[in-house]
Image (cartoon, rainbow, N blue to C red):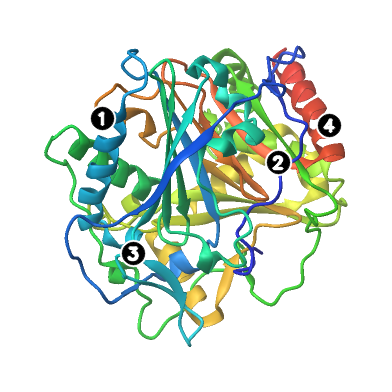
Amino acid sequence: MVSPKACGYINIASIILCKEAGNEKPRNTGAMRKLDVKIANAVHVSPARETFGGLYALSNLDQTLPLEVGIVFAFNGEGRGRCSASIETIRESLAKALVQFYPFAGRLVMGIDGRMAVRCTGEGVPFVEATSEDDIAALGDISTINPTMLRKLVKDSDGAPTILEVPLLSVQVTTFKCGGIVIGIVMNHVLVDGKALADFIAWWSDLAQAKPPSVLPFLDRSVLRPRQPPRIDLPHHEYALRDRQPGLMVDPKTKPLVYRSFCFKPHALIQLKKAAKISTQNGSSVVPTTFEIISALVWISRTKALGIGPHETTKLLTAVDSRPKFDPPLPSGYFGNGIALSCAECSAGELTRKPFSFAVQTVREALASVTESYIRSAIDHIELNRVLVDCEGNSCCISKWSRVPFYKMDFGFGRPFQVAPAMVPDNVIFVASKSRESDDLVVFLGLTSNAMDVFSKLIQHELTLKSKF
């Protein structure tokens, strides 16, 4: 369970390593790379004109995700050296975008009923202008997840006492002497999910190019309101009561996490799929999806690395976009958290001792269970029980970024050549594309140092073993 009294992320360790799955030789991690970034200006960007000024209600799905997520977008730029006009364009178009997406310019508050909402004050979005005397090539491969370096490229809220003090959106634009540009964005997950953030960035980048935005935001979150009366039709083990005591929660002050990323190449995934075909009742077999394969392998390896007892329950929660699950689907441009969480669970003994196909099948069945009925039941469960996502200890969450259209963003100086997380919340795993031109997928996660060493060896062993099939 993630407490609202935490920002959802922890301090980072100094040892960072990235390996290619199926290859014991470490990639160039960039752990020793140094990046000199200087803050040149810091302001708040408010909507370009007056907007709604009251309380903006959030849905029940929003209430369960008190996390802060940072993303960096690396652009080669125009290759003509630093360009102040680019920053001006980004800032002015942000102000225009905030007219439609005005909740970003407000502040998160807690009501007397214990529910969070947005007070639409129009105070604006923190906007930082920074410079680096390095070329953008100094970043290297940012998919190797070097948080020490990448967090210089975002305006995070390290030290915020509660999620309420974390800005709903913050932006940092860092220009490099070669003309390269990095846009670092930090979102408060209480307000939006990845899909909603991508819609906003698409609108913002269209405005930067003086193009008509393609999708209007749909801000009315009452489409996800509880039923009257609320009713819980299904079990919801993806949530935990707010007052539950921490289980295996690691104290970041005494045991900081090590972050690593693992690159899965297409040929390795093909072999894994062959090794994990799922048999159906009629005797045929089903080839699992790439995401199901990765999820199952990471779940098994993490469970082993943490030394979870064979009789203890382990859970893998998966963020599923609920927008297309409804009939009719949620309105195009739905602005908010449209994700529901599937819950794959079993004993650690079953997960680690049964064939790989068992884990894949368990993940697959959990994903298939996320229907409109399941989501409506989850919304009502939150209404009646005031719960949070159960994402600690024996549980972890996995989120697929590879289909979020981050690589389509263009502010007028080309699309990003790489997009990567600048911070990974505790017990959360991201799966993302390695770069714009690559079919490789990268898994990002954090564990304590000892657990990460075990996890790394297990991933390599499992991939080597299954690649023989």
Q: CA distance from mark 3 to mark 4?
A: 45 Å
Q: CA distance from mark 1 to mark 2?
A: 38 Å
Query: Which residue matches tag 2?
Result: 446
Mark 2: which secondary structure?
Answer: strand
Single out the mark in the foreground, 3 or 1: 1
Q: Which residue is mark 4?
A: 453
Q: Position of residue 82 (x, y in %)?
A: 36, 21
Could you classify mark 2 by the number of other residues whose Cα lies within 10 Å: few (under 14), some (14-19), or many (20 or more)?
Answer: many
**Crowd rating for badge 3 (residues with CA inside 10 Å; few <14, some 14–19, many 20+):** some
Q: Amino acid at mark 1?
A: Ala
Residue depicted at 18% across the width and 39% down the height:
207
What secondary structure is found at the residue carrying circle 4? helix
User: Which of 293/411 is in front?
Assistant: 411
- Disc number placed over residue 123 in the picture, else none: 3
In-image side of 383 versus 24 (left or right):
left
Q: Earlier in the sequence, mark 3 or mark 1?
A: 1
Measuring from the top left, give residue 196's x and y in whole percent.
35, 50
Label 2, label 3: how far apart the Cα atoms are: 34 Å
Q: CA distance from mark 2 to mark 4?
A: 11 Å
**In the displayed structure image, the side of residue 255 where residue 138 appears, left or right:** left
Of pointers 2 and 4, the one earlier in the residue sequence: 2
Helix, strand or loop at label 3? It is loop
Mark 2 is on which residue type?
Gly
Residue for point 44% across, 65% down: 62
Residue pointed to by mark 1: 85
Q: Which quadrant, please, contains the N terminus?
A: bottom right
